[in-house]
Amino acid sequence: MYEKLEQLISEGDYKEALYEFQEEYQNIGLRSDEDASRLCVLEASIWEALGDGIAEFEAIAKGMSFDQTNYELFYMLGLYYQNFNIDKAYLCYEMALFYCDVDSDREVIASTLQELKKDTRVRVRCVSVMVLSYNDLELLKMCIDSVERSLPKESLEIVVVDNASTEEGVREFLRERADSADYSFKLIENSENMGFPVGCNQGADCCNEDNDIFFLNNDAVLTTNALFWLRMGLYENRNVGACSSLSNSASLQEVAPSLLDEYAGQELDNLWHKKLGVTKSFEIFSKYAAVNTIPMYYPYIKRFRLTGFALLVSRDALKVVAPDNKVFDEIFSPGYFEDDDLGMRLATASFEQYLCTNSFIYHNGGSGFEGHNDAMERSRQTFIDKWGFDIWGFCLHWQEACDKIADLYAERKEPLKILDFSCNFGATGSYLKHMFPDVFVAGVCDNSFAAGIAKNIVDDVVYGNLNTSKLPWNDHSFDVVLFEREKVCKVRASQFVKTSGIIIDDREEERD
């Protein structure tokens, strides 16, 4: 199949190759996923030869939507990245070798990797996957199996801390896996349930000190390439401290049930996975992930906290915020809000935190902590006592304002400049920057702490008196101004909006 197209490419007749590709592409819907992916490899080869990186990238992404394990696509993605992000190139070549089953091609890929390893610019670390285990044997098996399918064993370490599981077979399974593994698999067995923060810290202390650490719940199961795309996020730039995935069940990181309906063949509602069971639910979620786990130009949503069910943290960040390997503050034991606390520590240390929208991890969730029904409220108060504010008041974006900005964006069909007097920690700015990457968002905070968090998320931020401080932007220079009537007067907001712009407050929208 595709012999004529391959011949044209090998002869360097790329114009004719494009015509032939277009003919073949008309029937791509009739091809198997493997054959469709192969056609996209050939398309990417044409664009690479013609020097069109944008078309090449899009062809690779299209190919991965058909076959997520096509090693040629990973190799080509490595070539795409090599001259402007050598770390991401390294990760792509590593996965190309992981998936490759052709000996001659393996030699080429391995040689490429060996050359990169000599390059002092490459800073990619191996990964220690730290799994906190408590019961749920079948989910635990799925969890461990999914990790082993995610990375080459040379780059992988698994550290499991079992928190005194009472379910029959859990400890026996873990001991057998630790004994039989042909890679680094460490097992810590606690005689009592130490809770989430203490158990995770035990595991972190046992991880290879040179590795990044991926904290993973034992009821979380990785879809194909989920960990790869998290690592791509972590090495996007040197300021990234942590990354997490979208899920079916994770606070502020959930895929809306309505987006999964077509893969389920039925209308889903909240907690749908609890009603359908693990096997069926993971199958549905994996089908959705397979279509969306692809290269994207910027698949990241900047956050100031991420949910701890599946959290990849860079070793460089850990050296700053947890030099003693006390990654999670144990005052939050048995659990809850320790991930929010870590997020604040990372943010105040100026590390960026990414929610990766092309990485998907199934999470069964919802079991809580036995014998600690008040754990969430107690930990919430502990967080307030430690930081001086309730984080629940800062995590959500202003949906009504964002909807109005979306309407204006669609109407104008051009980038917008937005000034947010209600910036706080940047939740609204985070949403807007994800939905409309070319908008410019400036924030005004009423204190330096909030500004220090928001600067990791929005394009520009200042702090001071919301009504009287002199701001560094010209009058009437913003398309949209957001403000809350209780904190900012309308005259102040009007000072910065263009004559053709809009003011959005928490009571009304007014067009000037």
Image (tube, rainbow, N blue to C red):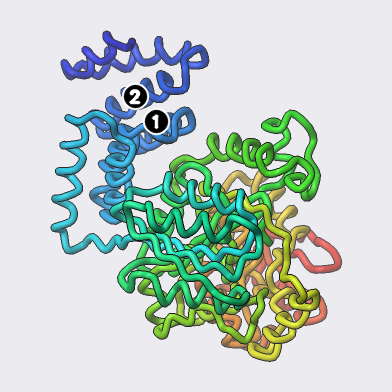
Query: Mark 2 highlights which residue?
Result: 43
Depth order, front residue of 181/477: 181
Q: Quadrant of residue 125?
A: bottom left
| Element type where label 2 sits in the image | helix
Neighbourhood count class around disc 1 (C-alpha, 10 Å): few under 14, some 14–19, many 20 upward:
many
**Of 472 and 372, the residue lying toward us:** 372
Q: Is residue 469 visible?
A: no
Left or right: where 240 falls relative to 477: left
Instruction: Say which quadrant the C terminus sits in.
Output: bottom right
| Residue 184 sits in quarter | bottom left
Q: Which residue is mark 1?
A: 59
Alpha carbons under labels 1 and 2: distance apart: 6 Å
Badge 1 or badge 2: first in the primary sequence: 2
Residue 163, numbered circle:
none
Residue found at x 31% / y 55% = 155
On the image, the x and y values in percent for residue 283 come to: 62, 36
Residue type at mark 1 is: Ala
Whether tag 1 and tag 2 are in contact, CB under 8 A, the answer is yes
Q: Which residue shows up at 75% across the image and 83% down it? A: 378
- Label 1 sits on a secondary structure element that is helix
Residue type at mark 2 is: Glu
State the image coordinates of residue 333 (x, y, percent, origin top left): 64, 81
What x and y, as percent, mark residue 331? 62, 86
Q: Which residue is painted at 27% across and 10% down in the image?
A: 3
Question: Eyeballing the image, is 114 above or below 387?
Answer: above
Q: Is residue 433 left or right of residue 89?
A: right
- Residue 341 appears in the figure: yes
Residue 104 in the image: above or below residue 30: below
Where does the N terminus fall, quadrant-wise? top left
Q: Residues within 10 Å of mark 2 (few under 14, many from 20)?
A: many
